Amino acid sequence: MENLGALSLILAFCFSIYAIFGSVVGKWKQRPFLVKSAERAVLAQWALQTFASGLLVYALMTCDFRLSYVASHVNTAMPTLYKFTAWWGGQEGSLLLWSWILACYSALVVWQNRKKFRDMMPWVTATLMLTQAFFLLLITYPLSPFEVLAVGKEIRAVPDGNGLNPLLQYWSMAIHPPTLYLGYVGFIVPFAFAMGSLITKQPGDAWIHTTRRWTLVTWLFQSMGILLGAGWAYAVLGWGGYWGWDPVENASLLPWITATAFLHSVMMQEKKGMMKVWNMVLVSATFFLCIFGTFLTRSGVVSSVHAFAQSPIGPYFATFLSIHIAATTWLILDRLGYLKSEAHLESVLSRESSFLFNNLILLASCFSILWGTMFPVISEAVTGEKISVDAPFFNRVNIPIGLFLLLLTGVGPLIAWRRSSFESLKKAFLWPTVGGIVLTGVLFGLGIRHLYALMSFALCAFVLITVAMEFVKGARAIATKTGQHLLRAMVELTHRNTRRYGGYIVHVAIVMMFIGFTGAAFNKERTIEVGMGDKFSIGRYELKVASIEQGENSNYSWGHAVVEVYQGGKRIDTLTPEQRLYSAGQGQQSSVVDIRRRLHEDLYLNFAGMQDGKAIIQAYVFPLVGWIWLGFAALIFGTLVCLVPSKVRYEFAKTKVMGVASGVATPKAVTGD
Amino acid sequence: MTKRPCRLLLLLITSYLCVAQVASDMIPADVKRVGSRLACLCGACKNSVGDCPMIGCHYSAPARERIGQMLKEGTSDDAIVNIFVKEQGLKALVVPPAEGFNLLAWWMPVATVLLGLMAIYMWISRMRKPVADAPAIDPAVLEKYRDSIDQDLAKLE
């Protein structure tokens, strides 16, 4: 079986190399059959990788401990779900998953465009397969998931495996890595189309129209991956931290930020034919940051609790990235003539300008995170001394940037395309500003003195009012004309322009998350040693440890504290935080916290152990944290709305070079997008 | 089932070992104050010694104990921080010190924003130039288009 798996991966590598040369030579020498055969090679390497992945999953599920990977990440007592998720629990398996997802995406791209973009597709195929070949090289040579445990010339199986890290045996961790990979890998597709467009000197924006949905879906996966990871950290690590500015966490955020900037600035290109070079840079940067993130997680360059074990693949990634960055830079510089703007900026007070500032702030945030993440390495290289750059640094730098970004989220929708007058802006900003100021006053009156918290809440109110005004204004017009109820009119309005109003829903989701982040300014914590039947208080709660219960199953033994929760003398809940000791490996310990989730605050308990017959309880009150997860749901909903085809498609004629408006919005009823 | 008592015993021992390093159940405010200037170097988190929440953290727990002891002996906050820096190097600090090469850590993000603003200013200046050359439009023609726009917008609503 291991031979079949390894052979499949070697063949898949050969097919991907063939696909690169077949595409390039076929296009260069004008041999369509070569191009076609290269596309079939893409499908063949997908089939081979699917087969290899199936074999590895089968080995994991059947506990085939002859394989080194299986013995390291599975044991017989593990639940079936986690045996399956062990596929991405280790370095080799997760690289195979990465590669398989890319194979799926590549096959889908080739199949979807089998009759479209015939000029550009060979280059798209070659770009995709170049990355594919790189990852296949890693899993066929230095990090094969099919390596066997050998003693001399004999293949030996161990009686039982080490099992999966207990921290990873949690439902959201079962889906967090694949979701994140769907995001990471997906950004390669827009990059490949951008490269295809540059190489073939495409005159229009075909690559943008083609990849808009790809980018959006990929962005959604990346967002989901990041937030599932945050949810896992909150519920599993035992101290309620959903974001710790760890290098691996930062690595997932960097491409998300540049992709967010791209999703905004691409509208400038679609509507006005502007910022073509910038969009090329952003889509390329997103791809490079995805590869860089993968490199950071797996090379051991920076220390992180989330990183895979140190491996020899760092130089491979460095070489791959250097060649790609150099080639892309050269290509963009060489094609500058084809990327000229088709329009000019008519006014500084315009939506175009707000997009520029949005991009600047997003990129500044991206750079500051990258800089902070890499600074320990840079400082060690320059001064010989390693410097710690921890959460306080990132918070100090990124909180002001984040607040400014929040402001722009509200300001952007209020400014018209092309130009806005001061008068119209004054009118548009009046109520959102009043709302923000009133809320600040109320919160100040209630005793809140935390400056950033006050600013954040005020800006949240500002953005919510601007979005609400946009919805109400548009819905009222429809309701007046059709006699529909205002809520029905809002649905109709959203359906007419899903991209715009779906985008506003995503903005609301971001506001919800900011409300949750701001709540952290008011966290309460208490670590206490408490006897059976004794009470202690935190915030408005009184807690009593009623008893300690113990038990075991085949996977772990457990002990949990039964904690009764009182409020105003009345018992309102019972929480049972648990501590586990896993039988596999070296008896690893893990906490399973219990959380009383409410929208205004979470009561979060961790049972840290026993001392002298007393329970050690870590109790936390996290105000507003639930809004982050609510925002997560709203973000998914908003992005899905953006993906629904609009009922009415507006076509905007682009502004002519001379700066004279030549067209207005001309609605066209269409059945699809 | 024979393994059960062993495992439970192991669980309790491990729990005890974890908490045995903790000096007290609450971190005193002054220890937290000094600890918030020092990085937790356990390798598993990016917190400060003052707010590292891991009960059995092999770095923060003894560090807090030491800080508490030194505070009792009357050592000043700065002196305590300096002792840690002397022992561990600059990595003992939670943020890079604002001196020498490390100033770059703080100034680079600011420099990026300033450079970006400069780039936007230059881009806007370049992109706005041709507007001055726009040909004059006959008001009558413009009025005709305005009517047309109004009619189209009315249809839209």
Image (spheres, coloured by chain):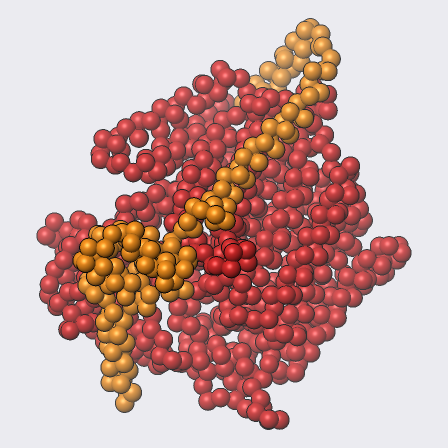
Chain colours: A red, B orange
The residue nearer to you, when weighing A435 against A48, is A435
Q: Looking at the image, is A615 positioned above or below residue A234?
A: below
Where residue A1 appears, as percent x and y from the top left, is 62, 83
Q: Is residue A616 depicted above or below A243 in this figure? A: below
Q: A205 or A283, which is in the foreground? A: A283
Q: Position of residue A377 (x, y in %)?
A: 52, 58
Residue B1 x, y percent position in the rendering: 28, 87
Q: Residue at x 33, y 73 (%)?
A: A589
Where is the C terminus of chain A found, in terms of image quarters? top right
Residue at 66% across, 75% down: A141
Q: Residue at x 43, y 46 (%)?
A: B98
Is A512 placed left or right of A35 in the picture? left
> Which image quadrant for residue B79?
bottom left
Q: Position of residue A180 (x, y in %)?
A: 52, 58
Q: Where is A96 relative to A478, above or below? A: below
In depth, the one of B20 and A219 nearer the eye is B20
The answer, for residue A180, to whether it is visible in the render is no
Question: Relative to residue A464, is residue A377 depicted above or below?
Answer: below
Position of residue A347 in the picture relative to residue B96 (left or right): right
Q: How many marks?
A: 0
